Amino acid sequence: VSYLTDCPHREKLPWLEQLHLMFGSLQYTFDMFSLYEKMLDDMAMAQLPNGLVPDIAPEYALFREAFRDSPEWGSAFVLVPLYLYEYYGDGTMLRKHYEAMGRYVDYLTSKADDHILKHGLGDWFDIGPKMPGRAQLSSLAATATPIYYMDALAMVKGAELLGKKKDAERWQKLADAIRTSYNEKFFHKEGCYYDRNSQTANSIALCAGLVDPEYRQGVLDNVVKDIRSRNNGLTGGDVGYTYILRALEAGGRSDVIFDMNSRYDVYGYGYMLAQGATALPESWQVVPIKSHNHFMLGHLMQWLYTHVGGIRRDTGALAYKRSVIRPEAVGDLTMARVSFESPYGQIRSEWSKGADGSFELLAEVPANTTSTVWLPAAEDAAVFESNLPVEKVAGIEYLGYKEGCKVYAVGSGTYRFDVRPQR
């Protein structure tokens, strides 16, 4: 293993965009740190003197124009080192590549027009009226500029972590300028949407943090409205789909994600299965002449772990030192089992839901860590742990009733929670 790839029949090339777009899904399944370390070195060696990081690294083939210079691809070099720090607690790659990361962002700045980037491949293979390829439903700026903004914010965080105060101020100034310019040019206040009101354009703006707080619900509502108007069908492609999922997650709309991905009659995973796919195709439409072994559309795996299974990293701590176990019994699901080897050890969530409203959860929290457990329950429901009333179990602290859940703080150990509704 030396890099992530797809198209085993055709290219076998290390396209970079999935290094950051699929990061959340991959880290639940594999210990990715050493492979990412190698791939970041590849990017550093492939970087051109002008700062460009090409779309593939190592650059085994020399492509031209957007296939060599697309911000959504090259930005893996900026975003991944920060993700490695947050998810693995190791800042080695951030320290090693910080200066080169900055050169890439400076390169993007040199390509920007009033802080707007509008080159690249865009939302590759989105679902539009034409054969899949370059973005059809979103402008190139609608993905390139939000990614550019995320790059600038990543540089702010990197500079702060490395104690580079002046650098942090410089990158923050750039981020603020990008945000202002993008909102002025691409946000439509009257309709509360971005660009052409596509699922991708609205979702990536939400995930990047470009949307002012008073408009966030309206922008999310437009994402949901578009999905519902298509019989719960998606339109996002290689870049957009992950942000559609993440925006819906953050907005508490796992019900929409479930509805999008539990059917066979609209484009999605069910449709792929109905067409006989045994691995992820390159296109949602399962176009015969395209690849039938890709991993670029596999972003749903993250949701299966973080929301169906409920295992999430507490964003206030590094490397799952604090976790959140918050399963969601969405749709007609009645049970789920997930486990994950975090840097501290196994985190496990196994739940089942009864027809009478009961809910059972087995939660495993590794040594030297803590977790916050969210149990779906009515406020007057009784909660037991290992058949004892939870309030009588030492080491479990009740944090209150929030968003339809009873919330508890726990330390390391294995817990067997049982929610029993009042009769």
Image (cartoon, grey):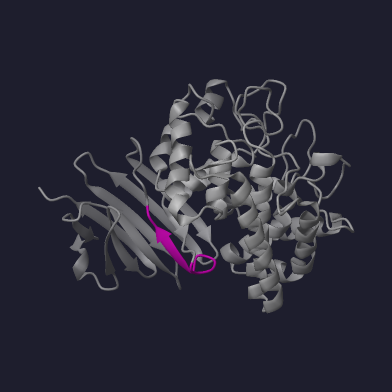
Left/right of residue 161 with respect to residue 222 in the rendered view: right
Query: On screen, 42 above or below 322?
Result: above
Residue 286 percent coordinates (x, y)? 62, 24
Q: Report the number of numbered marks.
A: 0
Left/right of residue 198 with respect to residue 264 in the rendered view: right
Quadrant of residue 386 within the rendered picture: bottom left
Residue 232 percent coordinates (x, y)? 45, 29
Please state which of residues 142 and 30 is positioned toward the viewer in this rendering: 142
Please state which of residues 176 and 57 is positioned toward the viewer in this rendering: 176
Residue 261 visible in the shown view: no
* Residue at image coords 67%, 78%: 165
Query: On screen, 149 above or below 18?
Result: below
Residue 144 visible in the shown view: yes
Quadrant of residue 62 within the rendered picture: top right
Left/right of residue 171 with respect to residue 196 in the rendered view: right
* Residue at image coords 73%, 44%: 118
State yes or no: residue 319 in magenta. Answer: yes
Residue 115 percent coordinates (x, y)? 71, 54
Predominant secondary structure in magenta? loop
Residue 248 percent coordinates (x, y)? 46, 44
Left/right of residue 228 with respect to residue 416 in the rendered view: right
State yes or no: residue 306 in magenta. Answer: no
- What residue span does the magenta drawing correspond to? 316-326
* Residue at image coords 46%, 50%: 216
